[in-house]
Amino acid sequence: MTTASGNDHGHQDGPGADHDHDAEPITDRVHDNSWSANLEKPAHGEDADLVRRQALEAVEHTTSGHHVNLVTHGAHGHPESYLYETLETRLDGDVDWEYVEQCGCGGHVTRVHVR
């Protein structure tokens, strides 16, 4: 497993608020190619749990031998602080990931390779 090295904000409801009603599914198909998942929408900035759930969905919808770029909202900081543990515990070592860069908008790109 590879580890990392070193917007528009909508309303904030309390911790654990359910924003699923605001979020469309991240994808509706299996990707037999490399692709990018946009996790930078306002609903993602409001809800780190939504980012984690949809990041997992994106990886699960990527076929073996390809990668998905998880482009995460800057509101939650570096994905190492909230996303990498989820990838490690929920995907049982079936993936490798690497931190790519911070976008000019403040978001972050993590590339997840599916084995």
Image (cartoon, rainbow, N blue to C red):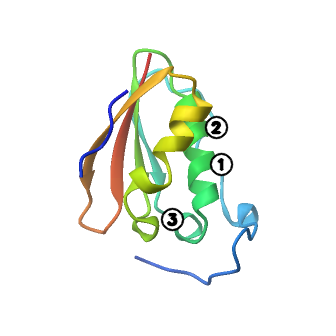
Locate residue 21, reporting x and y percent: 76, 64
Q: CA distance from mark 2 to mark 3?
A: 17 Å
Relative depth, front residue between 13 and 64: 13
Q: Which residue is mark 2?
A: 28
The residue tagged 3 is 41
Give the class, few, some or many, for how many residues have Cα within 10 Å of label 1's Cα (few <14, many ≥20). Answer: few
Q: Quick one: label 2 or label 3, which is nearer the N terminus? A: 2
Secondary structure at numbered mark 3 = loop
- Are the residues tagged 1 and 2 within 8 Å (C-beta)? yes
- Looking at the rendered structure, which numbered label has been put on residue 25? 1
Name the quadrant of the C terminus.
Answer: top left
Few, some or many residues within 10 Å of mark 2 (<14, 14–19, 20+): few
Task: Name the amino acid, label 2.
Answer: Asp
Q: Is 103 located above or below residue 71 in the figure?
A: below
Tell me where residue 46 appears, x and y as whole percent: 58, 71
Q: Measure the C-alpha gap from mark 1 to mark 2.
A: 7 Å
Point 61% across, 33% down: residue? 90
